[in-house]
Amino acid sequence: MICADSLNDAGLILALNGADERLQITLGRLAAGTTDAATGDPAEAELLASQEWTVPGQAMRFLAPGIGHMLDALGAKAQDIRAIVCVHGPGSFTGLRMSLALAEGLAAGTGARLAGVGHLELLAYEAAHTAAGAVLALSWSRRGQVYAQAFQSDQALTPPTVVCLTTLPEFLAPLPRPLYVLGGGLRRNLPVFQELALKDVGLRLLPPLWDAPRPQTLLALAARASFGPGPLLPVYLRASDAEDNLAAIAAGRGLSEPEAQAILARGSRTLS
């Protein structure tokens, strides 16, 4: 963990990433006097502390205690947090729900402003600004699929989408070359991409170092996020395993599928 000795009146910014196997919590100090010309939001932040755990499916055990530990070490309080940025997906359904819920609750209790950032944009951010070519960020989606989005510098070349491994050649064909490929979706399906790279010399498979963003990258993107009113909504891109298996799950609980659907609908209503 990296700490600083003092805080200033600009306040703190908290950035959370629960979208992947590596849970990331980053705390920074907003840089006074550096704002985005278009929005007036702070455009820079200094890294004060960060913690990371590889704890898939266990984000809730580490999120609140991790934030509390960093605040205590800095001699700060939750009320010193002026901005909260949370990765909203696509990625782990459980990790996204837990981190977004904590961000919403903490913002409600402290009055901090709230913003979301995309997981694939975060994965690609550093490479897209340094690579002499396009970057394809991939995260794991299970079931022979990956979440995918391509970037070149500050430009998104595609929207975030779910791509089946069997249709990868068609998805990759129109993208610029060289195309640097990175992320957990690459690592978990490495033989597939190695075979594609043998046939396409324009594909450059980046090493595991690029599978997760650095804390400084998470904080840099968080400081430039667009803050606004309204709740943070998760970006899932596909149905959850529970939704796909709803009939079997409902039957095991003595419910019909329409009854289970009605329960899900009631639980998914937006609160006003």
Image: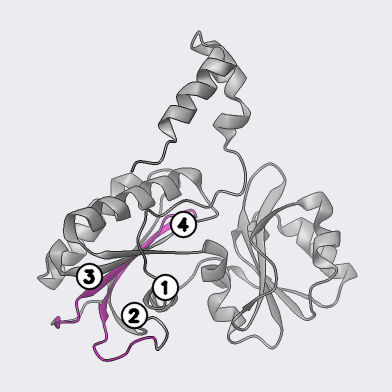
Cα separation, mark 3 vs mark 1, equals 13 Å
Q: Earlier in the sequence, mark 3 or mark 1?
A: 3
Cα separation, mark 4 vs mark 3, equals 19 Å
Q: Nearer the viewer, mark 2 or mark 3?
A: 2
Q: Amino acid at mark 2?
A: Asp
Label 3 close to label 1 by CB (< 8 Å): no
Residue farthest right in this picture = 199
Label 2 close to label 1 by CB (< 8 Å): yes
Place residue 205 in its image quadrant.
bottom right
Q: Residue at x 76, y 57 (%)?
A: 191
- Residue that badge 4 annotates: 88
Number of the label disc, if any, that sits on residue 225: 1
Place residue 80 in its image quadrant.
bottom left
Q: Earlier in the sequence, mark 2 or mark 3?
A: 2
158 relative to 10, above or below: above
Observer-nearest residue: 110 or 230?
Answer: 230
- Residue that badge 3 annotates: 82
Q: Amino acid at mark 4?
A: His
Label 2 close to label 3 by CB (< 8 Å): no
207 vs 104, left or right, is right
- Residue that badge 2 annotates: 41
Residue farthest left in this picture = 75
Label 2 close to label 4 by CB (< 8 Å): no
- For label 1, the SS is loop
